[in-house]
Image: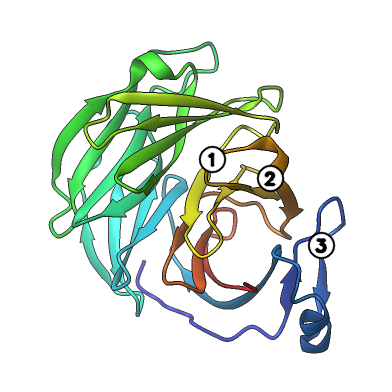
Amino acid sequence: MKHLLLTTIAALVLLGCGEAPKEISIHDAAVEAGDPLVFHVTGRLHIPADDGQQGVATDGKYVYVQNTQQLFKYDLNGKLVKAGPKLMLHHGGIVHVKGLVYAAVSGCDSNGTNQHRVHVYNAQSLALIEKHDVGAHFTVCAGGITHHKGHFFVAESFFDDEHLDKIVEFDSSFQHIKDYRIEFKSPYGIQGLEYLPGTDQFQIHSHGKVFYRINGRFENHSLISGQANFELQDLARLDAKTLVVNNREAQTLEFVKLAR
């Protein structure tokens, strides 16, 4: 877990709704620049995972990587800074907010479970400092998590592709605000989500190659979908123009420049 390969990649990935992924040239990228589902992969961080790479978060200086049961902290040069305690239950998506890392945690049982929590870690030490019980609002597995305007949004993941996507909004103390049902069935439910303030959209990743964006009010008419050329997981916004996307199968983090 110590080597960084931050190499510019010549190939650009076109994510088009319902189309097979393909490599495009710089000229083609310019032609497609008006398409919000085109992004450029500009670099790659290799993070070997011994128990399944799940979540990713960043504060702009460090990258936090959540394996199934353990949280890690790296600098942007790929150096391992800190490893958190290895814990029980399944850990999914994570988000960094004001010096804290929040992780969605579940029993993750295909038959259903009421074990769903949000763990709160000190981002400097990775010490677990708090747990919030959100078990009343999920049935199978709490998946992605993000933060927007003081509220947290936690999504549900599943063991099939038959459930409509579900996102639950909580206040800063994890008191329930509202449930959102989205007219989309992500493969294995939602694994990652991130708010994009530049477009007032949430970007939502599945466990497969499909992803979509939806506006900040989760209105179904605003939904647009695309497809990557690798299986997605969690994502985090590094800055106004760059996402860090978890490529779990390759055990890498992809640095993605948004087209707009």
What is the crowding at mark 3: few (fewer than 14 residues within 10 Å), some, or many (at least 20)? some
Residue 170 location in percent, x, y? 34, 31
In the image, residue 210 above or below residue 135: below
Mark identifier at residue 217? 1
* Numbered disc in front, either 3 or 1: 1
Does 113 sit left or right of 122 as displayed?
right
Q: Amino acid at mark 1?
A: Arg
| Earlier sequence position, callout 1 versus callout 2 | 1
Residue 120 location in percent, x, y? 21, 41
Q: Amino acid at mark 2?
A: Ser
Q: Going by the picture, which residue comes out furthest to the right?
A: 19
* Numbered disc in front, either 2 or 3: 2
Q: Residue at x 70, y 30 (%)?
A: 183
| Earlier sequence position, callout 2 versus callout 3 | 3
In the image, residue 190 above or below residue 81: above
Instruction: Tell how many labels.
Output: 3
Residue 69 visible in image: no
Judged from the image, the secondary structure of the residue bearing numbered disc 3 is loop
Residue 10 location in percent, x, y? 69, 86
Q: Residue at x 62, y 43 (%)?
A: 206
Tag 2 near tag 3, CB within 8 Å: no
Residue 200 location in percent, x, y? 53, 55
Q: Amino acid at mark 3?
A: Pro
Does 57 sit left or right of 29 as displayed?
left
Q: How is the image coloured?
A: rainbow
Give the camera-side residue of 223 and 19. 223
| Earlier sequence position, callout 3 versus callout 1 | 3
Mark identifier at residue 126? none
Judging by the rendered image, the residue that carries numbered circle 2 is 222
Mark identifier at residue 21? 3
